[in-house]
Amino acid sequence: MPTAVPVPGQATQRMQRQHLPMLLTVAWKNVRLRYKSSLFGFLWTLFNPLLFLLIFLFIFSRAFAQVENYPVFALTGLIFWSFFATTSAHILSSVVDNAHVLRSLAVPAQVFPLAQLMAGLFNLLVSFIPFAFILAWFGWRPVPATLLVIPVVALFASFLFGLSLALCALNVYFRDIGILWSALLPALFYLTPVAYPPDLVPADLRWVASLNPLYHFIGLVRVVLYDGQIPGPELWVPAIGLSLIALLGGLSVFNLLRRGFIANY
């Protein structure tokens, strides 16, 4: 009697269904662990961007007086920067932090980076509610174009996950990657127009600024949330391209290196 040959796509779907409960459990565990034994718990998600906003208002509000409603301008960038910095750091260390689980259980290594991404997206989603009230207090009002924040978040999360997945795999072999990333994040923050308008960059140097992927994503976020407009192709195309390159590249690096994970924990 002929034996049925499994189709690769069907096998992948079965594996995803098999590990979905574990993925959701790990993601929710990550959410709880971030605020375990913390006096203020989830409020720390709000505290970090708001602290930076107060600093920016004190230092930059007069310097950037030409920026209409600077608090809304700064906060829309800070929300997404905080999501990027925090989630990338958690994904980067996720495999190393769970090495004991991977040694003892037959768990796909990609469960832990993906669970950290889901935890980061959950925090971002929940933080949107209080941040919407804070933005409204400064005069921001949602418009129909605001709904485009959903595909923007999807693209940003794809880019973030791909980049962090590659760093996560490299971190198993070279633990200096985590230290290097922590050192690079502050520099990347000031190289990205989070607190200042992109027009501040000299015209002859804007091509250099455009090499920073976050330059494009923060610009896309601002058009949707700050300007309340529908972004043009000149903003969508780079974001989509960067997301695909990062995601495919990150998955390739992770799959290439994961065979040696156990030997390098």
Image (cartoon, rainbow, N blue to C red):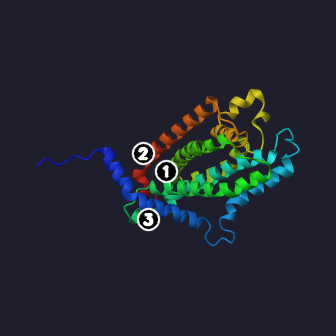
Neighbourhood count class around disc 2 (C-alpha, 10 Å): few under 14, some 14–19, many 20 upward: few
Residue 238 seen: yes
Choose between 66 and 132: the one closer to the eye: 132
Is residue 197 rendered to the left or right of residue 231? right
From the viewer's side, name the closer residue of 91 and 172.
91
Q: Earlier in the sequence, mark 1 or mark 3?
A: 3
Q: Going by the image, does 8 lie left or right of 130?
A: left
Location of residue 248 in the rendering, given as x and y in whole percent from the top left corner: 48, 40
In the rendered image of this protein, does residue 199 appear above or below residue 252? Answer: above
Q: State the residue at coordinates (45%, 59%).
A: 23
Give the amino acid at mark 3. Answer: Val
Q: Which mark is residue 101?
A: 3
Q: Point out which mark residue 54 bears.
A: none
Reading the image, the residue beneath label 1 is 169
Residue lying farthest to the left in this orientation: 1
Is disc 2 placed on a helix, strand or loop? helix
CB of mark 2 within 8 Å of CB of mark 1? Answer: yes
Image coordinates for residue 110, horizontal then vertical, percent: 45, 53
- Mark 2 / mark 1, whichever is N-terminal: 1
Q: Position of residue 193 (x, y in %)?
A: 73, 41
> Which residue is pictured at 47% across the width and 60% down the height?
24
Q: Residue 43: which quarter of the image? A: bottom right
